[in-house]
Image: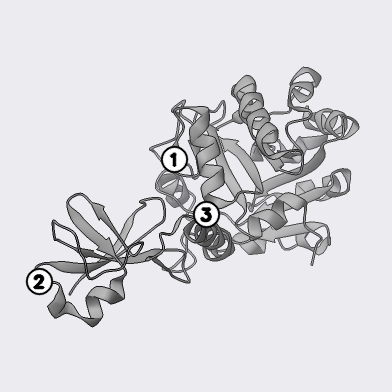
Amino acid sequence: MPVLSTACRLCQEGAKMVLFVTGRCNRTCWYCPISSEKKGKDTSYANDRIILSDDDILEEARSMGALGAGITGGEPLLVPERVNHYCSLLKNEYGDAFNIHLYTGIAPNEDVLRLLKGCVDEIRFHPPEEIWEHFSESAFPESIRMAKSLGFEVTIEVPSLPGLHYLIPVVDSVDWFNINELEWSETNAEAMRGKDLSLEDCYHNAVEGAEVWAADILKNPKVHWCSSSFKDSVQLRNRLIRTAEITAREFEEVTDDGTLVYGVWEYSGQPHDIEDGMWEESDGNIETAWWILAENPEKYPGKKYIIERYPSNGILVEVIPL
């Protein structure tokens, strides 16, 4: 088992906020999984919250008890000043211990690296697939050398694709080397089919055969494999649980999946038989603990139901009439 970077350990804990700084990119990688909602659009998100002001970033970080952030896109270094501003904002708010890593498919020059110094802790280089065979002749080795000399932790992070063996000689030149299991998405599905690829099963987004392509490079103990199922069932789940536990109202129940469960009673008025702190008025209805309505339905005439949804007024999972 490889030793993980601070950023990876925080991701496992669900303590990393995803800071998507732009959907613009200077590449057209066939395997890119970014959604059509974000792809190509110069819009920023903190987790799933659109960023309209600095407060949106800080509020999202507080809502999940973030201990760090991952800067992603698109290509973040197409907007380096924006990256510097957002990262400096978070460092000023939370201090140097707030760990920030940045993904880039660009080999940044010294000027860009110096702009990032002090606000980004780890740079994760994503050399595009088409240069893997001739990596040593690209701009990446020199950019990696400069980044290390300036004190950044340096990682190469790539998807699992045929041709990974070309990067075996590169592993020992960086601090960390991560391989993400290739994932199917709405935006890369056509390209996947064009390459005769298919899903591994009906439950995950992993592409069949992706781990086989990584077999040789994974023999190096420095190389870390990040599976599609792990990202969904561990990283995302833990982030949702952190957010749910911090934002839950007193009467909401946090599930093992990080969703919130509560009851809704379509009643306008003061529910005098429910103790203070155990209910709120919302959209003309009473929201309270689900079990209060379920255990004594006759006390609460009219429509009532149980709601399960993601935190921060997120996606509705289920509505159960009572």
Q: Callout 2: few (<14), some (14-19), or many (20+) C-alpha neighbours within 10 Å? A: few
Of mark 1 and mark 2, the one earlier in the sequence is 1
Of mark 3 and mark 2, the one earlier in the sequence is 3
Structural distance between the alpha carbons of marks 1 and 2: 37 Å
Q: Are marks 1 and 2 in contact (CB under 8 Å)?
A: no
155 versus 215 height, above or below: above
Quadrant where the N terminus is found in the figure: bottom right
User: Label 3, on which residue?
Assistant: 183
Q: Amino acid at mark 1?
A: Arg
Asked if one can make out residue 214 in the rendered structure from this viewpoint, the answer is yes
User: Label 1, on which residue?
Assistant: 49
Task: Tell me residue 67's x, y (percent).
Answer: 66, 49
Closest to the observer, 30 or 22: 22
Asked if one can make out residue 29 in the rendered structure from this viewpoint, the answer is no
Q: Amino acid at mark 2?
A: Pro
Residue 100 horizontal side relative to residue 258, left or right: right
Q: Nearer the viewer, mark 3 or mark 1?
A: 1
User: Label 2, on which residue?
Assistant: 301
Quadrant where the C terminus is found in the figure: bottom left
